[in-house]
Image (spheres, rainbow, N blue to C red):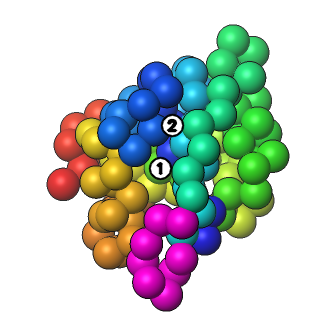
Amino acid sequence: MRIGVTLDDERGLSGNVCAHFGQCKFFLIVDVDENKKSIIKTEVVPNLAVHGGGGCLAVTEILKYKVTHVISGGMGMGAQQKFEFAGVKIFGCLGNVEDAIKSLLLNSLGGIEACKEHGDCH
């Protein structure tokens, strides 16, 4: 499993999930061992599409990293549809990145609509 998480800064696991997918400055790419439910590797990468017109361009950017799941605070319908077409599962959450990933691994994270008003996901 490879998870992409939206970030406002470069703090990685200790940072917070960015509230707006298309406007995040960075992505955290997380490789996970699904059997052990543990993080194997993380990498913070810049969102090169952040200034390029929103979520749909950012979808293309994050898909370059072969993610299978995405966590973000909010996301427009165009981006959601693009992820659906690519077979990528999307989840909505705000707060600490590491907590969001743990929640996803425990199957306790909801879809993006659950956090569309940018409330807490827990």
Q: Is residue 74 left or right of residue 79?
A: left
User: Amino acid under label 2?
Assistant: Thr
Q: Residue at x 65, y 34 (%)?
A: 45
User: Amino acid under label 1?
Assistant: Ile
Decide which of 102, 12 is in the foreground and name it: 12
Decide which of 47, 13 is in the foreground and name it: 13
Q: Residue at x 36, y 34 (%)?
A: 15
Q: Which residues are magenta?
A: 33-40
Q: Which residue is mark 1?
A: 71
Horizontal and vertical percent position of residue 2: 62, 63
Residue at the top extreme of this rendering? 51
Q: Residue at x 60, y 71 (%)?
A: 1
Q: CA distance from mark 1 to mark 2?
A: 7 Å
Asked whether the viewer can see residue 56, the reply is no
Q: Earlier in the sequence, mark 1 or mark 2?
A: 2
Q: Residues within 10 Å of mark 2 (few under 14, many from 20)?
A: many
Q: Which residue is mark 2?
A: 6
**Local SS, label 2:** strand
Decide which of 19, 7 is in the foreground and name it: 7
Q: Residue at x 66, y 19 (%)?
A: 50
Horizontal and vertical percent position of residue 58: 70, 32
Q: Residues within 10 Å of mark 1 (few under 14, many from 20)?
A: many
- Above or below 58: residue 104: below
- Above or below 37: residue 7: above
Q: Which quadrant of the figure has residue 59?
A: top right
